[in-house]
Amino acid sequence: MAGAAPIWNDGLSMTFVLHGSARLDLCYDSLEGLSVGDALGAQFFMPGRSVSDLAAGRPPEPPWEWTDDTHMACSIVAELRDHAEIDQDRLSAVFAERCEPYRGYGVGAVTILHQVRDGQPWRAAAAAAFGGQGSCGNGAAMRVAPLGAYHADQPRRAAHQAIASAEVTHAHPEGIAGAVLVAVAAAHAAAARLDGRRPTPAQFLDRLDPYLIDGQVKRGVLRARRHLGVSVQQAAWELGNGSQVTAQDTVPFALWVAATSLHDYPTAITACVKAGGDVDTTAAIVGGVVGAYTGLSDRPSVTAVPGAWTEAREPLPTWAARTGS
């Protein structure tokens, strides 16, 4: 990774150690939550979709096609499945090879990945984006939750690996900071599931404190902590809803939703739809974090990813399957 990665001390010692199979179980549950949220959220860019129908338990008719959020998350998950860690050169190569602009990839991402495909080093391509500032977009955050779930017992490891996954396309500190916080949130969500104790919304956001790096994303997350208990609409007004397609306008609201509805996947995704904006991305981030906690089966006081929603979502790529392809 470029430069020295921060060293965090979150003051939380995990009381369990995960083995490979258990890590992948959590990782794939998070991917399921991410991809269903992404695909359902994307439906609300189409005319005739009703938020009130969704809130009443009547989602749009299938099939629901997923977008670049899911596509890139699948590449991260496949890397963890096959190699148990993120190698930046390898990840940038598969991102570039698999890039399909029709999936909704942003112009900046398409430019970077095409340059990488043409032989330019990923570090140079990412650094040159947006006039040399690098991207502060929400793309690194939208794809990273399964990586966090994979490291449920090692939130600091999740943070470092999130930096590695982000840097190949996002050289701006805000874009990287957003990815770190989503990964750590997913790690803590998965850990809470294993521990059997759901944190309060305030406790959940407080666990991100050691990973807050000074900047707009940090200030947004601190605002999210102060706005717990407000309506979805007010939270979106105060924190952003992703309409600017930046990490700082997306991650604070997504983490507010995840903290508020960690135990209830349908409610969490419906909140993203109600907020409007970049709905597929906020729903992907929220779905990945909440899915790491709920899993795919209901249990006492937990409402998981609905099976009907999974069936409505377009199948995931065969190369991302748990057994590979």
Image (cartoon, rainbow, N blue to C red):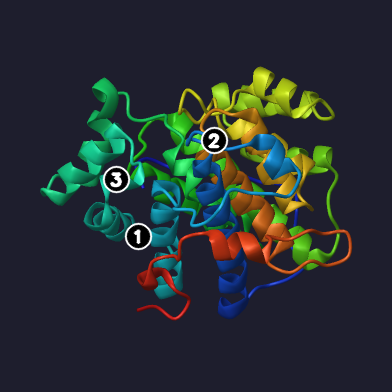
Contact flag, marks 1 and 3 (Cβ < 8 Å) = no
Packing grade of label 1 (10 A; few <14, some 14-19, many >=20) is some
Left or right of 33 in this view: 171 = left
Q: Amino acid at mark 1?
A: Asp
The circle on residue 208 is: none
Residue 165 on image: x %, y %? 41, 50
The residue type indicated by label 2 comes to: Gly
Residue type, numbered disc 3: Tyr
Left/right placement of residue 254 relative to residue 81 reads: right
**Residue nearest the observer in this picture, 215 or 40:** 40
Residue 102 circle label:
3
Q: Quadrant of residue 31?
A: bottom right
Q: Which residue is mark 2?
A: 48
The residue that label 1 is drawn on is 87
**Callout 2: few (<14), some (14-19), or many (20+) C-alpha neighbours within 10 Å?**
few
Question: Is residue 18 depicted above or below 131 in this figure?
Answer: below
Q: Quadrant of the C terminus?
A: bottom left
Mark 1 or mark 3, earlier in chain: 1
Task: Identify which residue, 33 or 43, lies in the foreground.
Answer: 43
CA–CA distance in space, label 3 to label 2:
22 Å
* Distance in Å between CA atoms under marks 2 and 1: 43 Å
User: In the image, residue 124 lies at what x, y percent?
Assistant: 21, 38
Task: Report crowding for label 3: few under 14, some 14 to 19, many 20 or more residues within 10 A (C-alpha).
Answer: few
Q: Residue at horizontal 57%, vertical 66%?
A: 311
In this rendering, the answer to whether 46 lies above or below 13 is above
